Amino acid sequence: MIGQGRLLAFIFVFFGCFYPFNLSAFELSIANGQLVNDEIAVFHDASNKLSINQLIQPHEDLPFESIVSIAQVNASESLWLKLTLTNRDIQQRDFVVHLDNPSLELIDFYLVKDKQLIDSTTLGRHKHIAPISSKAFPHLLSNLPANSSATLFIRVKSNGLPHVPVYLHSIASFDQTVNVEFALWGVYIGIVLLMLFYNGALFIYSRSYMYLYHSSFLISALLVTGLSHGYIYFILPDDLVFKLVGQDVSFKFLMAGFAILFAVEFLKSHSQQPMRSVLVGQYFSFLCFILALICIFLPEQFNNQLITVSQVAFYGLMTWILSNSYSNKERWSKTFIISWLPIYYASLIVPLNYYGVVPYDHLTTNSFMLAIVLQVALITLAHAERYRVKEQKHQYLSTHDPVCGLPNHIVLNKALAQLHLAGRAHTLLFFKPYTYTTTRANFGIVHANEYLIELCFQLNDKLDGLNMFIFEERNQGSSVFICRFNDETFALLIDTKIEELLIEQYVSNIKEALEQGIYLDGTYLVGQVDIGIASYPVHALSADLLIQRALQSLQFAAGEVDHWCLYQQDTDALMRNRLKLAADLHQAIANNEFSLYHQPQIDLRNNSIYGSEALLRWKHPELGFIPPDEFIPVAESAGLINEITEWVVEQALLHHKHILSSLPSHKISINISARDLNKRELPVQLLTLLTELNIKPSSIVIELTESATVKDKTEAKNVLDDFKEMGIKVAIDDYGTGYSSLAYLSQLGFHEIKIDKQFVFNLESNRRHQTICKTTIEMAKNLDAYVVAEGVESELVAKMLRQYGCEIAQGYYFSKPMPFSEYCQWLERYAQSA
């Protein structure tokens, strides 16, 4: 922001830009030749009633004064100029008296010789007075005989008499002056018209209103300068000019309004303007447009006073808007600010010229037109520079991620093509940090992006010094090794042939950066990462195939214990099988190929039947029975799991309704997928079915894997709360295989905890597993929850669990999973044997 002193200086420089000071000053030019003027004087006719006859035959001496003592003239007054002309040549001389101000209201020329009127001409702005050429160039063409003198009286009337330069020309010099003026006008109008076409093309291309604002500013400037210089009489019909004459103040207000709008929009479109100055500029422009309309109906003299007062606000506001962008380092912004300096300069020349400080000549007279031309040239440069910057930014965004600034998949493809053409062995490594997804869901996109940026910094530091492909060098000299392939996946290029130990080192560095954690918004975020790896030329001979196989490895990494996978030759076959399974799953739902098995759950306290776990089975028409561990992940990735879960829930409740008729205390456990947590309609479906079948919700147990609850804690808690409010019990499945804490389990409030079968299978011989089971059972009792042990295959294991205090058990010792009809028969046999 510029200081107050510079702000005041700018205001004074601007002062007078739109309306010249009402101070009369006159100059006389002597053309080459023998025609000279002996004296020039002026007289104020305050009554506006003095006629030429009273001047020729005066009844009293009229107080004609020296030109230097002229005071300000009111609009109701007439000003009489008196020039004595002498021809000292031996032949008749033609001459032209030119008043270089076409905006005068009325001009009367009277040539008097020996107190006789020998020539007269009346000129004015109105259409019924004088031809077009005389309106644009107010002049008198006459002559003096050889060796004679005459007196020229000029009566001028104006709306508060502006500056009136008087020139005495020969016909040749006057024609030359007119031709020069026409040339200046032609250049000026041509440049402005070209800019109008340029703005129109840019508006069609971008649909940005700032180009229309600038065009409106230029059109207003054309009208204002046309009225003040006179060329408007040549470019518009006479009837239209007659309506525009005297409305120059309205056009000046339009200029001010559109100038502010253009400046605000030009700078705002690139986020260079604070919102406060934008709003103030818009309000001021609206006020200018209202004043422009009002001025049409007000007297011209009042309008001149109004614009004089308003210009101070305009200058100050424009200075404020431009100074807000002064600190911007973009070159187009500096050029835009500089483009207004010619207008500032012209605004200084105009008052100085009318004060008489600056000599009156063509340069000072046309200073505002010249300022507009220079501004147009600089604005064009600013547009071009801004478009270049915009293209550079577009190019950058097309090759970089807008959030973290990392190179994107386009840069990765170019890097792979470069290495491929060079024939250099290289390894592509994809990794997917799960914490980004959970952070975005639980903390919002802003915090997730902050996490992502910090993560990239940490990873980049960890990789520095390793044999990595450098995607680019930043201005600070730092190398960029990471590429963001898509929203959740990142890529690294190892610039060497594949070596198992080296790969493990990179994997270790990536995991270390993630496990190191990131402190964000009061939370320490530590996340899991999957890593997929493929190498050229070992695994692929093209860039596209290398990317494909690295992504395949990334998918398989999710199922690996250490969450990273190096591409194997059989990966393609496995992937094709998964794709075929996904397609067959669609048919399985339609063809009713699924069935529901039941595995009994026994109450160890009294060996009674507690209930059963409903287990989904799929008999493929060609491949036979496919294990759930194989097709459930495929269903989840294919987006079919919700539809399958709906089928399982409905079938399980129908089976349960049948069992309850003979065993009212029977419970049924139904497994749901982690993907089902995203579907809030599942509790509604359950409640609807329970109501229709008249089943108590307390006899239903929903099982959810521990890893699923950790993956999306917020959504898991919401869904589980819905189940608990309905009276449905909730169990955590496969306990001990996930990463949940005791505090987290306490938060969710499970009714049952199922110990994973890997801790039960060899319980009698594994002391570590014995400790885990004892601790889990004790913890469950403290949480007021039941414990269900899976994988019980011997009487000894059942006995040990009973001693530990485990309530429920299931496994092959009691029964394997059975189809529904067999399970019903088993229930009858078990009841009879008990």
Image: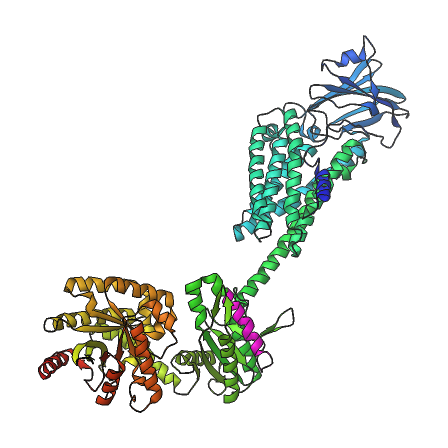
**Which quadrant of the view contains residue 46?**
top right
**Which quadrant of the view contains residue 625?**
bottom left
Judge whether residue 366 can be spotted in this image.
Answer: no
Quadrant containing the C terminus is bottom left
Q: Is residue 463 magenta?
A: yes
311 sits left or right of 654 in the view: right
67 sits left or right of 259 in the view: right
Q: Position of residue 698 (x, y in %)?
A: 20, 67
As displayed, is residue 421 above or below residue 197? below
Q: Residue at x 48, y 61 (%)?
A: 446
Q: Position of residue 388 (x, y in %)?
A: 61, 59
**Which quadrant of the view contains residue 494?**
bottom right
As displayed, is residue 246 above or below residue 190? above
As drawn, which residue projects farthest toward the top? Answer: 59
Q: Position of residue 234 (x, y in %)?
A: 65, 34
| Secondary structure character of the magenta stretch overall | helix
Q: How does the figure colour the protein chain or chains?
A: rainbow
Judge whether residue 155 can be spotted in this image.
Answer: yes
Magenta segment, which residues?
450-468
As displayed, is residue 194 above or below residue 576? above
**Residue 80 or 401: which is nearer the viewer?**
401
Q: Residue at x 82, y 17 (%)?
A: 64
**Residue 47 or 806: which is nearer the viewer?**
806
**Residue 58 or 560: which is nearer the viewer?**
560
As drawn, which residue projects farthest toward the bottom? Answer: 765
Q: Is residue 277 magenta?
A: no
419 sits left or right of 809 in the view: right
Count every numbered label the image shows and give the total.
0
Q: Position of residue 639 (x, y in %)?
A: 32, 70
